[in-house]
Image: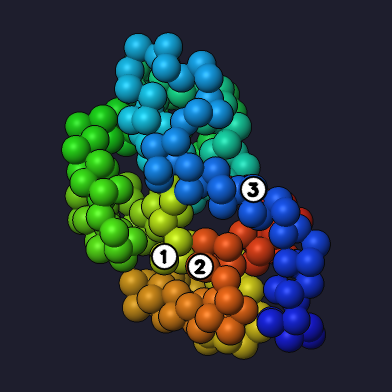
Amino acid sequence: MIPPLQEIKKAVNSVKDHVNERIAQFRNLKKNDLTEFDFRPFLDIDPYKADIFSEASFCILTANSSATLGIKIQKEVGIEGFQKLSTDDLFQIIRKKGHRFARQRAERIVMLRDKMDIIEKAVGIKSGKEARDILVNEIYGYGYKEASHFLRNVGFEDVAIIDRHISRFLFEKGIVKPRKTITKKVYLECEKALEDLSNQLELTLAELDLYIFYIKTGKVLK
């Protein structure tokens, strides 16, 4: 078995440019820097809010599913669709793409529209961990993983996304004792282990997540 630090360093050598590009996209969204998206000033709704809400909806779609499927649905729905389409229209798109919980996800996205003030409040907080607690307490359908995923995608770098790929890496490497269920306690234990790794590697948690995800899937997604 390749030691974890060695394997991550190998991944850094392989996909550092791709990871840096992805991190730059996340940071630009946090800074409200949408200059690369020339079409967005012509949206009927605030372009920054549209992006933030799209990412918040994306993370609802990834729960009990995958980032790959969430990305496909996000592209199909479009930047305005998450805020404008009816529950039935969202359901049809999500079902067509093969999501197991299409109706439930469509309903949760529509419910999310009433929480835009909460989302903006969380995004405006400096600490990702404080922002995450707000989201978990206020957003139906958000657990620690979903809230952390959203925050990472909008520029926070101090929370970890403990999905099945990341937890499997930690379990297989013997860094964290394997568990069948990721409770809050286990989640925070995994996050602490990742913080220790990130400090040794001089990476942020956001960067480390992308490298471990690449190790387990061969992809650099979001």
What is the secondary structure assignment of the residue under circle 2? Answer: helix
* Residue matched to label 3: 21
- At label 3, the amino acid type is Glu
The crowding category of the residue bearing disc 1, from other C-alpha atoms within 10 Å (few below 14, some 14 to 19, many at least 20), is many
* Res. 57 in view: no
Callout 1 secondary element: loop
Which mark identifies residue 159?
1
**Residue 116: where, in percent of width, then height?**
24, 35
Residue that label 2 marks = 205
Secondary structure beneath label 3: helix
**Residue 131 shows in this picture:** yes
The residue depicted at 56 percent of the width and 52 percent of the height is 23
Disc 2 to disc 3: CB gap under 8 Å: no
Q: What amino acid is labelled 2 in the image?
A: Leu
Looking at the image, residue 174 lies above or below residue 21: below
Of the two numbered discs 3 and 1 on the same chain, state the one appearing first in sequence. Answer: 3
